[in-house]
Amino acid sequence: MKALKIGKHTIEKPIIQGGMGVGISWDRLAGNVSKEGGLGVISSVGTGYYNNQEFSHKNIQGKPFSEVNFYSKDGLTAIVNNARKICGDKPLACNVLYASNDYGRIVEDACEAGIDIIITGAGIPTNMPEFTKNYPDVALVPIVSSARALKLICKKWKRYDKLPDAVIVEGPLSGGHQGFSYEQCFMEEYQLENIIPAILEEAKEWGDFPVIAAGGIWDKNDIDKFLALGCAGVQMGTRFIGTYECDAHPNFKKVILEATAENIKLLKSPVGLPARGVLTSLQTKIAEGTAPKVACISNCVAPCHRGEEAKAVGYCIADRLSDAYNGDIENGLFFTGSNGYKLTKLCSVQDLMEKLINGEN
C-alpha cells in the first residue's frame, strides 16, 4: 500500500482512524494509531469530560455547562499533548463536527494545540478555511456523501484561495450520524462503492486531491477494493473500538463486543438525521417514556436548538454519549458501524494495523 499524502503531511499507511466522541478516540487511541503509521484522529466532542472533567471549569448536575466547557479548550490541549507523548511528531488529526456550537473556536483550539490535520463532517463546512488562515500548514479534510457536496465546498473555498487537501467519502454503513435519510441508507445508489466514482471525478475537476473511502470498511479485502476503485486511502472507526488502547470505557467495549447484527440499527437523533448504534435499554426507556429527562446543559450541537429536538426524540445526545463514555450501560448511547457485530475480542492497535496491512482477520 502506498503512503497517503494529505497536504504537507505523509501518512505511512493509508489508514485513517475515524474520530469518535465522546471519549472513544482521544489520546491513547489516536496516539497509538499515528505511532503505528496510520493517522490517529482525536475527537473534539465532549473534551470537558476528559480526565474526570478536570478541564470543565463549570458544571451543572455533573455535566459541563455550555459549549465552552463541553468543548473544553484546555481538555483538547491536554488530549493532544498526551497523544504527542505517544506518537511524537507523526501526523495527528482532530475531528471537529461542523454541527458543533462554537465550531470555529474549536478548530482554532485544535490548531493552537498543534494538530496537523482537521477533519470535518456533520454538515457542509463551507467556511472551514476561515478558521485556519493563521495555520497554513494545517491540512483541511471535509467529509462528504455526494459529489454535489464536494463541488459546493470547492466553490465556496475558492474565496479563501484554498481547496481541500483531501476528502473523505462516507457511505451509509458507518457508525453514528449519517449523511443520508433513513430510506437512502438502504438504497443501492447511495452505497459507498456507488457514490465514490462521481466524487473521484469531481475531485479531478479541482486538482485531483486524495479521496478517502469510509463507512463499513472492515479488513484488507475492503481496503484493497477501494484502493482499486481509485481511492488513496480509507477511514475506519468501529474496528478500532476493538483495541486495548481505545479510550472507551470497558463497558462500552462490552456492549459492542456483545452486539449482534440484529441489534445494530439506525436510530432517531436530535440532529435530524439517522444515527447507527446498538439497541439497548435506552431505546426501550425512550419508547416507554422512562428515559432520563432532557435538560439542555451542554448546548452541544446547533441542529438540536438548545434541546428542542432532543425533547422531540426523547434523549439528549450529549448526555447519553457521555453516559456511554462513563460506562453507564442502562442510559448510554453506543454508536457503532454496521459491522460492529464482527468484533468479538480485543487486540492491540499494533496487531490490528498489521492485520489490515497483511490481510489477516
Image (cartoon, rainbow, N blue to C red):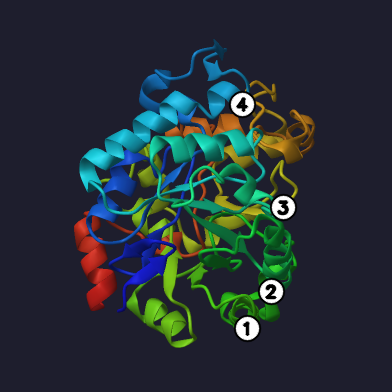
Q: Which residue is labeled 4 in the image?
A: 67
Amino acid carrying mark 1 in the image: Glu
Q: Secondary structure at mark 3?
A: loop
The 10 Å Cα crowd at callout 3, few under 14, some 14 to 19, many 20 or more, is some
Name the residue rendered at 74%, 29% in the picture: 307
The earlier-in-sequence mark between 2 and 4 is: 4
Q: Mark 1 falls on what kind of element?
A: helix
Q: Earlier in the sequence, mark 4 or mark 3?
A: 4
Of residues 311 and 254, the one drawn nearer to the viewer in this rendering: 311
Residue at screen point 26% across, 78% down = 359
Amino acid type of the residue that numbered disc 4 sits on in the rendered structure: Glu
At which x and y percent is residue 63? 54, 19
**Toward the viewer: 240 or 8?**
8
Mark pair 3, 1: CA separation: 27 Å
Inspect the image, locate mark 2, and give the three-letter code of the amino acid beneath it. Ala
Mark pair 2, 4: CA separation: 32 Å
Q: Which residue is mark 2?
A: 147
Lateral position of residue 86 relative to residue 41, left or right: left
Is residue 326 among what the camera can see? Answer: no
